[in-house]
């Protein structure tokens, strides 16, 4: 059994076979920030968390849109007949469309759930299983949520790319600490409550949060700091930053089989190390697979093969 499994017995594992070609950090940061809101809404209103997250990612541009930033509006919901709260004016179907403005992101997620749950137009969706995200995606379009004819495919693509459907089967107690003292058990509980354990290319990883250190991750996962630095190809003395990918096991020599014949398109500012981390592939393997010398500097638009 891997060392870090000694700290928990049932972490929520997300298997991700392919990453987006751009905006990876923004997308994952959004999922990390809002997954708990989506799960909470699912429990109370029976709307799949995958659907809520996918809609939020698309409608808000992963939280980067003006609506999300200035109005906490993650779902593009307009004022409507019964809205008496504040609003923001933006061009959409008309140059002066009015969109609901919320005080917090939580209010936006709550209003989105009520908008669907209390609207007779969407009543048929609630006869679908929580795990039927495809049915929900096509149903939202059929019921008139969006005018884009490709809206179902956009939702399904987002869900399957990031395996958001696994949140639809979320159950409480995703970790079970096994330590000697109540203080240690509480520390482990807090850590795994804040960090989802993902599985990328057969390799377990977490996404570092503000305040994380190599020493802290080593202590809570049972993987030594020396091994963490080795697995993540980081030098001694390097510091963890919020959003960093931290592998808890050795990365592979090639990417997932689904990426055969599919190169990564280098984005502005990306390094080969960034790309290797995103796909859970060892950096030296990336050089070898592409026949690159160590002095190679990737340029935006270059194609990098991962298997």
Image (tube, rainbow, N blue to C red):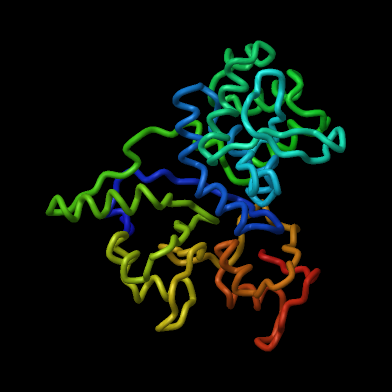
**Quick one: which residue is furthest to the right in this view?**
94
**x%, y% of residue 163?**
57, 42
Question: Which of these two is toward me, 147 or 162?
Answer: 147
Q: Is residue 272 visible?
A: yes
Residue 285, placed above or below residue 194: below
Residue 47, placed above or below residue 251: above
**x%, y% of residue 104?**
53, 41
Q: Residue at x 56, y 26 (%)?
A: 113
**x%, y% of residue 215?**
32, 71
**Quick one: which residue is furthest to the left in this view?**
181
Residue 148, placed above or below residue 202: above
Does 121 sit left or right of 114 as displayed? right
Picture quadrant where residue 22 is located: bottom right
Does 229 sit left or right of 3 as displayed? right
Indicate the quadrant containing the C terminus: top left, top right, bottom left or bottom right: bottom right
Q: Residue at x 27, y 53 (%)?
A: 188
Q: Is residue 124 visible?
A: no
**x%, y% of residue 264?**
72, 63
Indicate the quadrant containing the N terminus: top left, top right, bottom left or bottom right: bottom left
Q: Residue at x 83, y 36 (%)?
A: 96
Picture quadrant where residue 288 is located: bottom right
């Amino acid at each position: 059994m891997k060392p870090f499994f000694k700290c928990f017995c049932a972490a929520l594992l997300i298997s991700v076979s392919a990453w987006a070609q751009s905006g990876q950090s923004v997308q994952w940061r959004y999922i990390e920030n809002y997954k708990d809101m989506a799960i909470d809404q699912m429990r109370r209103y029976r709307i799949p968390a995958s659907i809520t997250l996918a809609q939020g990612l698309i409608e808000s541009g992963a939280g980067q849109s003006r609506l999300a930033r200035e109005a906490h509006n993650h779902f593009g919901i307009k004022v409507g007949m019964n809205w008496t709260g504040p609003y923001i004016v933006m061009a959409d179907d008309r140059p002066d469309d009015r969109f609901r403005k919320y005080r917090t992101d939580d209010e936006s997620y709550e209003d989105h759930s009520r908008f669907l749950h209390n609207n007779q137009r969407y009543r048929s969706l609630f006869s679908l299983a929580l795990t039927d995200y495809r049915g929900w995606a096509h149903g939202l379009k059929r019921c008139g949520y969006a005018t884009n004819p490709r809206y179902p495919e956009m939702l399904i693509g987002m869900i399957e790319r990031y395996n958001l459907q696994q949140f639809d089967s979320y159950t409480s107690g995703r970790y079970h600490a096994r330590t000697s003292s109540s203080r240690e058990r509480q520390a482990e509980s807090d850590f795994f409550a804040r960090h989802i354990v993902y599985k990328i290319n057969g390799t377990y990883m977490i996404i570092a949060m503000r305040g994380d250190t190599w020493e802290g991750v080593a202590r809570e996962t049972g993987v030594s700091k020396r091994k963490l630095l080795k697995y993540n190809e980081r030098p001694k003395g390097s510091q963890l930053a919020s959003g960093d990918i931290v592998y808890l096991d050795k990365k592979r020599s090639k990417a997932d089989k689904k990426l055969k014949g599919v190169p990564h398109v280098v984005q502005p500012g990306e390094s080969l190390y960034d790309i290797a981390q995103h796909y859970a592939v060892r950096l030296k393997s990336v050089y070898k697979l592409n026949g690159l010398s160590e002095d190679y500097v990737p340029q935006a638009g270059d194609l990098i093969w991962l298997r």
